[in-house]
């Protein structure tokens, strides 16, 4: 199982990566500090389909390409991806407008508010793929 952590908060990346590895040492984690690097990594994997993520944990507010822009880019290449990729918006925003906007993206599998707990991450791994809209902490 491969996770992409796309978030400019390096502390979130560090803690989440360590927690995922604690839950399952076989989990592969790739980290990106902005949406541009994350979407470029996915685009570069389209030819051979290797290295594509199973799960993307995506922040909203990032430099260069924010979470919403990432989702628009992902939408434009989604039909070229031959596996199911589950994208979860992971943000400190509990703004109802952000949640409603997130629900407009069929590409999203859920919405989590930071800090994300070990139990929430364990559900993502243990119950993969989580069916329906995952929104544990709202």
Image: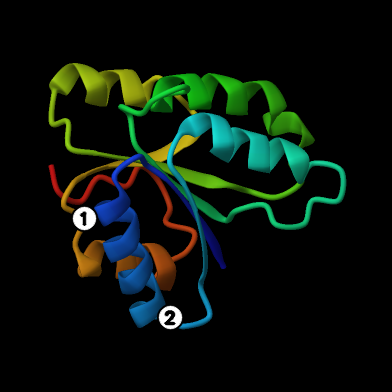
Above or below for 1 versus 110: below
**Quick one: SS at disc 1?**
loop
Q: Which colour scheme is used?
A: rainbow
Please name the residue that numbered disc 1 is placed on.
Answer: 116
Q: Distance between the residues labelled 1 and 2?
A: 16 Å
Which residue is nearer to you in this view: 127 or 44? 44
Question: Residue drawn at (40%, 45%), measured in percent from left and top?
Answer: 132
User: Callout 1: few (<14), some (14-19), or many (20+) C-alpha neighbours within 10 Å?
Assistant: some
On residue 24, which mark appears? 2
Q: Percent x, y for residue 121?
A: 31, 64
Question: Residue drawn at (67%, 21%), measured in percent from left and top?
Answer: 76
Q: Percent x, y for residue 81?
A: 74, 40
Above or below for 57 versus 3: above
Q: How many marks?
A: 2
Q: Percent x, y for residue 64?
A: 46, 22
On residue 98, which mark appears? none
Marks 2 and 1: in contact by CB < 8 Å? Answer: no
Assign the N terminus to one quadrant of the image: bottom right
Question: Residue drawn at (76%, 46%), measured in percent from left and top?
Answer: 45
Q: Is residue 115 left or right of residue 91?
A: left
Q: Which of marks 1 and 2 is nearer the N terminus?
A: 2
Q: Is residue 113 left or right of residue 51?
A: left
Question: Residue drawn at (47%, 42%), measured in percent from left and top?
Answer: 87
Above or below for 69 versus 88: above
User: Callout 2: few (<14), some (14-19), or many (20+) C-alpha neighbours within 10 Å?
Assistant: some
**Quick one: SS at disc 2?**
loop
Assign the C terminus to one quadrant of the image: top left
Q: Quadrant of residue 17?
A: bottom left
């Amino acid at each position: 199982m491969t996770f992409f952590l796309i978030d400019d908060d390096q502390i979130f990346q560090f803690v989440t990566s360590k927690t995922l590895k604690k839950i399952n040492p076989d989990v592969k984690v790739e980290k990106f500090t902005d949406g541009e690097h994350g979407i470029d990594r996915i685009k570069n994997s389209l030819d051979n389909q290797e290295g594509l993520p199973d799960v993307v944990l995506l922040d909203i507010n990032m430099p260069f390409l924010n979470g919403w822009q990432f989702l628009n880019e992902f939408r434009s290449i989604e039909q070229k991806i031959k596996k199911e990729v589950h994208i979860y918006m992971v943000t400190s925003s509990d703004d109802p407008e952000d949640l409603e906007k997130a629900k407009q993206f069929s590409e999203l599998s859920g919405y989590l508010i930071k800090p994300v707990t070990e139990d929430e991450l364990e559900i993502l791994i243990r119950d993969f793929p989580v069916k329906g809209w995952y929104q544990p902490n709202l």
